[in-house]
Image (spheres, rainbow, N blue to C red):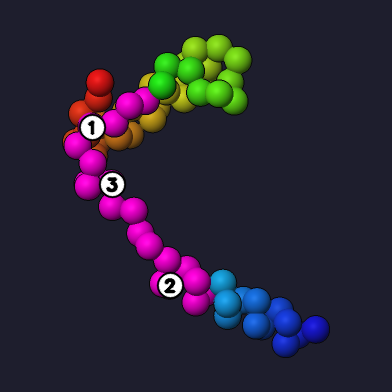
Amino acid sequence: MIKKIAFSFLFLITISAFSQELDINNYKYVIVPDRFDFLKSSDQYQTSSLTKFLLEKKDLKFF
């Protein structure tokens, strides 16, 4: 049982070490929707505003 746990843990560490990282600076423009699919109304819980604010800190432009 311990061997399975240790192997699983080692496997996850190995995958995360070699996974591809997304460099957000590769993109110049971003589209942030007014309403996300999992929400009932537009900008509910300020998700769109927060997303736009956090991406503007990375110097991205919006449509």
Q: Residue 16 vs residue 5: left or right? A: left
Whichever of callouts 1 and 3 sits on the residue coming sooner in the sequence is 3
Gap in Å between the C-alphas at discs 1 and 3? 10 Å
Give the amino acid type for the residue marked by disc 2 in the picture. Ala
Residue 62 lies in quadrant: top left
- Crowding around mark 2 (Cα neighbors within 10 Å: few <14, some 14 to 19, many 20+) is few
Q: Residue at x 72, y 87 (%)?
A: 3
Q: Which residues are magenta?
A: 13-32
Residue marked by disc 3: 24
Q: Residue at x 49, y 77 (%)?
A: 14
Disc 2, SS: helix
Give the amino acid type for the residue marked by disc 1 in the picture. Tyr
The C terminus lies in quadrant:
top left
In the rendered structure, find residue 6 and report the number of the disc placed on it. Answer: none
Membership of 16 in magenta stretch: yes
The answer to whether marks 1 and 3 mark residues whose Cβ atoms lie closer than 8 Å is no
- Give the residue furthest to the right: 1
The N terminus lies in quadrant:
bottom right
Whichever of callouts 3 and 2 sits on the residue coming sooner in the sequence is 2
Give the amino acid type for the residue marked by disc 3 in the picture. Ile
Q: Residue 14 vs residue 52: left or right? A: right
Gap in Å between the C-alphas at discs 3 and 2? 19 Å
- Crowding around mark 1 (Cα neighbors within 10 Å: few <14, some 14 to 19, many 20+) is few
